[in-house]
Amino acid sequence: MILQDKNGFVLPALQLSSLPTGAVKQLVNKLGKRIANGEYAVGKNMPMEPELVEEHGVSRTVVREAIKVLSGKGLVRTARRYGTHVCDIDDWNLLDPDVIGWHEPSSPMTHRIFVDATHFRILIEPKAAALAAQNATTLQKDILRKSSESLTAVETLSSDRLAADFAFHATLLDASNSLMLRQFRGFMHAILSFSYTTGVIALPDDRIEADAHSMIAEAVAVGDSEKAEQGMRKMLEVNISIAESLQPSDLIN
């Protein structure tokens, strides 16, 4: 996973990284987006295999492989007699980066996903920050410092801010030295990308503590677990307050 190059921070391509390239990946993306955004409604059947073959110009094998992937993510289930059925949202793997990323700003679930994801983050990231203060390497401390500096720089462009934001949070998870917490890097990639894309992050500066990332980076650098944990919790509590105050329409404008 590359976080930096000679020009600064970069956002690694993590979504669908486990899938083969080519027609299957493309079809999974297309069908996943249609399901996530309600074009294929929950509780209803998707088009039959011959229809998908004709519409997308792919083979039956490609369609079957794509459906198999979507089934593995909990979006659909198949039965010989009934075709491919779109599952209830409770069955979807909402920690899957692809499932999150397929939602457009206009999706009826976008607001709910952002709010619930922010609540979920506060369960794991403060503890990750505390562990990072105990276990971070010199390189990880340097990345945390540089990414926090990039986030506080006024001239940093939105795309660069997203890359720096991901570098900060992904490095914090890595620095925890927890195999389990590291598994949430993909989720973090998806929810940050989702947040910037839907415009949630583009909020008035006075609603977010501009130096929160820097404070956490400093606490990790000096090994202050309590301060790192408290700082991360405080930052996410602000995000929760913002998330809960938003209306679904705020994510569409």
Image (tube, rainbow, N blue to C red):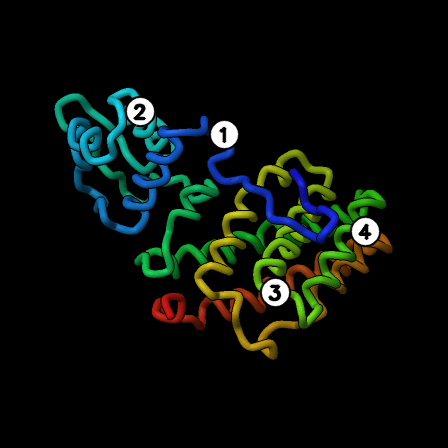
Compared with 73, 100 (above or below) is: below
Q: Secondary structure at mark 3?
A: loop
Disc 1 + disc 2, Cβ < 8 Å: no
Whether label 2 touches label 4, CB < 8 Å: no
Question: What is the secondary structure assignment of the residue under circle 4?
Answer: helix
Q: Nearer the viewer, residue 159 or 205?
A: 159
Measured as percent of width and height from the top left, residue 180 is found at 62, 36
In the picture as drawn, the residue positioned furthest to the left comes out as 81
For the residues marked 2 and 4, what is the alpha-carbon distance in whole angstroms? 45 Å
User: Which mark lies nearer to you, 1 or 2?
Assistant: 2
Q: Position of residue 240 (x, y in %)?
A: 52, 65
Other-residue count near label 2 (Cα within 10 Å), few / some / many at <14 / 14–19 / ≥20: many
Q: Could you tell me the amino acid type at mark 1?
A: Ser
Q: Say whether disc 1 or disc 3 marks the residue closer to the N-terminus.
A: 1
Q: Which residue is labeled 3 in the image?
A: 157
> Which residue is label 1 attached to?
18
Of the numbered discs 1 and 2, the one sitting upstream in the chain is: 1
Helix, strand or loop at mark 2: helix
Residue type, label 3:
Leu
* Local secondary structure at mark 1: loop
Task: For label 1, count other residues whose C-alpha is less than 10 Å away and answer few (under 14), some (14-19) or many (20+).
Answer: few
Which residue is label 2 attached to? 62
- In primary-sequence order, the first of circles 3 and 2 is 2
For residue 142, which numbered disc appears in the image? 4
Query: What crowding class fits label 4: few (fewer than 14 Cα within 10 Å), some (14-19), or many (20 or more)?
Result: some
The answer to whether 137 appears left or right of 234 in the picture is right
What residue is shown at x 41% (from left), y 29% (from top)? 22
